[in-house]
Amino acid sequence: MERCILATGAPRRIGFISTRFHGSDGVTLEMRKWADILTDLGHTCYWMAGQLDAPPASSHEAPLAFFNHPEVAALQEKLFGVTVRSRAVTNEIQRIKELLKDELYRFIEKFGIELLIPENIHAIPMHVPLGLAMTEVVAETGLPTIAHHHDFAWERERFVVSAVNDCLRAAFPGALPRVEHVVINSMAQKELARRCSLPSVVIPNVLDFETPPTGIDAYNADLRAEIGLKDDDVFILQPTRVVMRKGIEHAIELVRRLDHPNAKLVISHAAGDEGGGYIQMLRERIAEARIDVRFISERVGERRGLTPEGRKIYTLADVYPHADLVTYASHYEGFGNAFLEAIYFRKPVLVNRYAVYARDIDPLGFKVIALTQLVTNDVVAQTRALLADRAQREAWAETNFALGLKYFSYAVARRKLVARLANLYGEGV
């Protein structure tokens, strides 16, 4: 497909800033996509974070910006779940904030940054001093800013009780001129307007639907055998981290009730920072259900390569083409990258109708097996029928891919980012 390139005025030197640009978390993945789009438009992108996997020539690593830095983690423990903080805690917030302001100014001066994109810094308060530092730097420099918000404090139970409400009002998200606010779903847009009287635009998570996936090739052709599956096994893929909100217990229940001797549930990622108790519960459920579940996180990475034992490491793009069904039964998502991946790879998908899906995605007409918190007899029957009907799976795949191209492609993000730049610089689109 020929891409339409939009005029965005003069090329800009753009600085992405976050606590972490590393690995495969949603924030990092979306920022890489934005950077690809902006680079294609002629801009130059630079990176600052506490953890980085960007090239050193275009990045500035500031370890204190990482939310799990020991000093930051120790401070954050004193800020939430209580309603009063000591003067010493306030002083510690200010001390770290000032150190981070110095790092931000170094980054701006080092690369001649003309446009800032703070990535989730002004949304979820996992690093209060960084949010304050970012706000003050924007206020002091007047640099045009696109603040990209993935999830807000009010969306997370652990931030409800707080000793830093003054900081949250000042910087999460704050209210400064020459700042364009971007959210990833319409619910966040409405809440931002209601709570903070701030306008925003929705730029959903996207994938490069203009460039179809490569599928099975010489490298990944042996993946099934490598993870212990046979050609005639029903490969049911759960392509997420093992955290409670992903609803993996629904996938286990579905496989149990399918009662198919060759059905295998494959979980691609490891447990997250909240996964200890949850994964133990899942293992108990698996034992009770007497189903075959494969945890393959040690064989899945960001890039192809080899484990220390010399075994192949595959990417998610290698795993998806082998799946017969994708399960995505999350209780809550800010958007839903795994849903987009499933339709990008033309795979049938089972979805729990979490709020953002129900409001922003479901009305667009995607063909899925939908459940609402329960694996019912109807859900099991639909799944059996779909797995037995290749023609229907292919028809759904084509419909879903076309809708993904229309609503969640790079072209969508490209148009909306161009408009943000036009607003900030007064240039025609």
Image: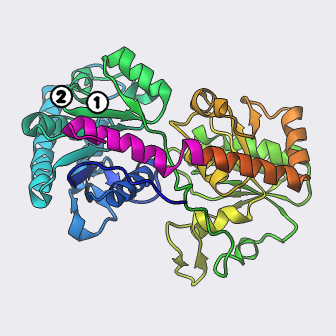
Q: Residue at x 70, y 73 (%)?
A: 223
Quadrant occupied by the N terminus: bottom right
Q: Which amino acid does label 1 sit on?
A: Leu
Q: In this view, does 234 lie above or below 181?
A: below
Assign the magenta stretch its main secondary structure: helix
| SS state under label 1 | loop
Q: In this view, does 6 lie above or below 193?
A: below
Residue 405's disc is none
Quadrant occupied by the C terminus: top left
Q: Residue at x 15, y 37 (%)?
A: 138
The stretch of residues the image draws in magenta is: 405-429
Percent position (x, y) of residue 331?
Answer: 62, 33
Q: Residue at x 61, y 46 (%)?
A: 404
- Residue underneath mark 2: 177
Tell me, yes or no, if residue 277 can be seen here: no
Q: Pointer 1: residues within 10 angstroms few (<14), some, or many (20+)?
A: many
Percent position (x, y) of residue 289?
Answer: 83, 47
Q: Is residue 150 above or below residue 100?
A: above
Nearer the N terminus, badge 2 or badge 1? 1
Q: Which amino acid does label 2 sit on?
A: Pro
Residue 79's disc is 1
**Which of labels 2 and 1 is toward the front?**
2
Q: Pointer 2: residues within 10 angstroms few (<14), some, or many (20+)?
A: few
Q: Name the side, left or right, on which 119 lies relative to 367.
A: left
- The alpha-carbon separation of the residues under discs 2 and 1 comes to 28 Å
Percent position (x, y) of residue 134?
Answer: 19, 39
Q: Name the side, left or right, on which 13 lies relative to 253.
A: left
Tell me, yes or no, if residue 72 can be seen here: yes
Q: Name the side, left or right, on which 257 lies relative to 4.
A: right
Q: Residue at x 26, y 57 (%)?
A: 43
